Amino acid sequence: MGTRERILDASLELFNQEGTAAISALTIATSLGISPGNLYYHFRGKEEILAALLAECDLALARLYRRMDQELNTPVDFEAFLLSLLRVGHHFRCLFRDQEALRFGQPGLAQTWRRQLRQIRQISQLLLKRLDRLTPLGIPEEERNRLADSLMLSALASLCFELDPERDSETQLLLSARCLLTLLQPYLPEPTPLLAQQEPLSNH
Amino acid sequence: MGTRERILDASLELFNQEGTAAISALTIATSLGISPGNLYYHFRGKEEILAALLAECDLALARLYRRMDQELNTPVDFEAFLLSLLRVGHHFRCLFRDQEALRFGQPGLAQTWRRQLRQIRQISQLLLKRLDRLTPLGIPEEERNRLADSLMLSALASLCFELDPERDSETQLLLSARCLLTLLQPYLPEPTPLLAQQEPLSNH
Amino acid sequence: MGTRERILDASLELFNQEGTAAISALTIATSLGISPGNLYYHFRGKEEILAALLAECDLALARLYRRMDQELNTPVDFEAFLLSLLRVGHHFRCLFRDQEALRFGQPGLAQTWRRQLRQIRQISQLLLKRLDRLTPLGIPEEERNRLADSLMLSALASLCFELDPERDSETQLLLSARCLLTLLQPYLPEPTPLLAQQEPLSNH
Amino acid sequence: MGTRERILDASLELFNQEGTAAISALTIATSLGISPGNLYYHFRGKEEILAALLAECDLALARLYRRMDQELNTPVDFEAFLLSLLRVGHHFRCLFRDQEALRFGQPGLAQTWRRQLRQIRQISQLLLKRLDRLTPLGIPEEERNRLADSLMLSALASLCFELDPERDSETQLLLSARCLLTLLQPYLPEPTPLLAQQEPLSNH
DNA sequence: AATGAATGAGGGTTCATTCAT
DNA sequence: GATGAATGAACCCTCATTCAT
C-alpha cells in the first residue's frame, strides 16, 4: 500500500479516535514511522488530508447512491441501505463530528463540505421517494421531504453523539438503524424485520 | 454587569460565530477590551469558560424542565416547549457543534458533557411521556422512547448542521420545530397548529 | 531601554554583521536572552523588524534633510552633510545590502522601500541644487541631476560593496566621501578641504 | 543543450527575477521539468550553482577585458565598452544584488566573490588609464583611480537599485551609461556621442 | 481587579540533501 | 543520467499561561 494511502488510513483512524483538533501532522507521521517532511511531501498539511478524506467519503456515498438506484427493489433492501449508509458515515465519523474544522477552515474545504451535506440530503430524499414507490407512504411530497430531513438529521446526530458509548460500534449502528426505522414505522403496512426482532441487541 | 459575565457572553458569541477552536483566550480578552491577565484572573483557561457555559446551558435546561413539569398541560403547550428547548440549544449551539473539545478535553469537562447529554435524553423522554398522558400516542413505552431519541437527535443535529444556512436563525428554529412535529404527526389525533399553518415560513 | 528598542538594536547589529537572511527570529531572541514568544509579542516577525528599521532610517534621513535645509550655507557644510548621510547609511547598511528581502518580501515593505529610494534620490538632487546656489556649478539642471544620481549611486554602492574591507568603518566612510567629492571636483572653484588633505587616511 | 547548461540558464533567469533567496533547488528543478535528484546530480546545491554563475560572469568579464586591450583605440570605442560591461553586469545582476548570499555563504564562494570585485575594480582603472592615453584627462593617477572607483560603484549600484524600474532594461542600460559618461564629461575635450544625442531615450 | 510583558512548549511548514531504483 | 520518495534539521509562529506590578 502506498504511503499516501497509509497516511489517509492512519489519519482517519486517529481523527475518529481522538478528534481532528487533537491530532497534529507530527502525530500522524510518528504513528506511521515516517518523517514529517515525508508527510508534507504527500499532503500540504492537515487540512489537505481532511479534504482527501472528505473526497473519499463523497466517493463512497456516490457509489452507494448509484447502487441504490439499481438495487433498491424491496422494503427489505431499504433496511440494508440504511445500514450501509450508516456504516459509511461511521467510517468517516470524524468528518461529521468536527463541524468546526470543516466550516471554519480553508474556504475550499468549507464549500466542499456544504456540497456534500446537500448531497446527503438529496440521497435521503430520493431514498424515501423510492420507498414511496415500493410501498406508498400516504403522505404528500412536502411532508415526505420533511420526514427525509428528520431521518437524515437523526442519522447524522447518531454519528456525532453516540447515545450508548459503552456498546460496540456494530451494535450502535443497529440501534441507530432501529431508531430511524421507528420513525418510518407509522407509514409502513407492517413492521420491518429489524424492528420485529426480539431484543437481539441487548445480549452483548 | 460583572467582568465574569461579560467574558462568558463574549465567549459564547465568538464561539458560536467562529467555532471554539478558532477563538483563543487572547481573542476573547481583546474583544472585551480587557487584558489576558484579567481573563485568567476570572477563568483558569478556555476550558473553564467552556465548562461555565456548559453549566449555564445545564441550568437553562433544568429551569425549562421544571417549568415543563408544571405548565405542560395541553398539546399546544408542547409546541411552545419544543421551541423553547430549541432556542436554548441554539443559544448554546457552539457546545453541540464542538463535540471534540468537549469529549477530548479535560476529563472533568467530558464527564459533565456526558451527564448533560443524558439529561437532555431524559427530558425528551419525559416530554413524550407527558404528551402521551395528554393525548395517548398508542405505542408501547419502548417505541415511544426510541421516538424520543430520534426527536432529540434530530433536534441536536439541526443545531449542528444548519440545513438552510441562508435563512435567519428564527426561521431556522421554526423549520426545525416543524421537522420534529412532522415526526409526531402520525401519532397525534389532529394536525398541530404549527404544521397547519399555510407556508408562513416562506414569506420572509 | 525598552525591549522593543533592544530588539531593534540587536537586530540591526546582527543584520549588519551577518546579513538579514542568515539571522532568524530565534537568533535575535537568543542574542538578547529573551524568549521567542516575547520577540513575537513585540514584532509580528522578522519582516516587521525590517520594516521598523526602515522607518527608523527614513526618520533619520528626514531629520537630516530638514537640517540641511537650514544649515547648508557654505561649501564646507556640504562635506559635513555628505559624511552625515554616509554615516546614516552605514548605520543602516543592511537595508541597502539586502535588496532581495526588501523587494521580494511583503508588498507593503517593498513599497515603503521604493518610496525611501525616491526620497534619497530627491535629497541628493536637492543637495546639488543647494550647492549650485552657493557656488555655481556651471552646468544645466538636467546634467546636474544626472550628476546627483551618480553621486547617490556611488554612495549606495560604497555601503553595499566595501572596496577596502580591511579598513575600519570610519576610514571607509572618509574614503567614500573623498570618492564622491572627486566627482564634484571639476565643478568647484577650489579643492575641497577633504581632498586637500595630505593622505591622512593611509596612516592607520 | 546539456542539462547542466539548462540548469544554469534557468537559475540565472529565476535568480534575476525573484532573488536568490526566494528560489529553492526544487523551484529550479520544477521550472525545468527535471527531478530534484537530477539537479543534485549536476550541482551539489544552490551555492554551487551560484559559484558556477559567478565563474561564468568572471569569464565574460575576462573575455571583455582581453578585447578591450586590443580594440579600445578611440574614445568612441570607450562608450561601446561601457555598454558591453553594463550588459554583462545586467545579465548577471542577481550576483550584484545578492551581496549577502555571496558574502555569508560558503567561505570559498565569498573568496571568489571578493576576487571578482577586485578584478572589476582593476578593469575600471585600466579602462580609465587607456582612455587617458587616447585623450589625456589632465588629472593625476590617484585622482584618476578614485574616478574609476566612482564609476565602478555607480555602475554596480545601477545594477542593484534600478532608478527607473518602469523602463525596459535596454533603456535602463543606456540611462546608466549616460550617467557614467556625465561623470567623465568635464575631463573630455568634447561631448561624447551618447551625451550629445537629443533625448533619444524619452521617445519610447 | 486589572495590566501587559514574558515564557516556553508545541504545531505547521519548508527545504537542502540523500539514496535506492 | 534521471527519478522521486524520504529524511531531518531548522524556521516561523501561536497560544495557553504566569507573574510582577
Image (cartoon, coloured by chain):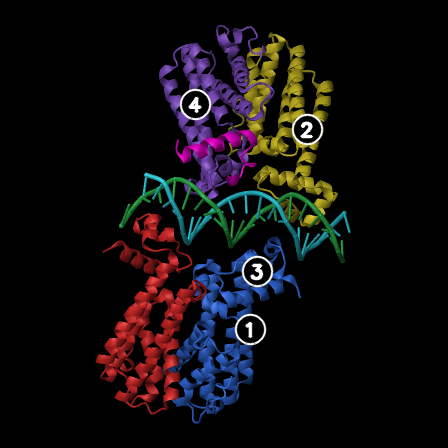
Chain colours: A blue, B red, C purple, D yellow, E green, F cyan
Residue under disc 1 on the same chain as residue under disc 3 = yes
Range covered by the magenta-colored residues: C1-26
Structural distance between the alpha carbons of marks 1 and 4: 69 Å
Amino acid type, callout 2: Thr
Front position in the image: C65 or C31: C31
Q: Chain of mark 1?
A: A
Structural distance between the alpha carbons of marks 1 and 2: 61 Å
Q: Residue at x 54, y 65 (%)?
A: A14
Q: Do the residues bearing badges 3 and 2 touch, measured as CB atoms within 8 Å?
A: no
Position of D115 relative to A45 (above/below): above
Front position in the image: A37 or D14: A37
Q: Which residue is mark 4?
A: C123
Position of A181 relative to E5 (above/below): below
Amino acid type, callout 4: Ile
Quadrant, the N terminus of chain A: bottom right
Closer to the N terminus: mark 1 or mark 3?
3
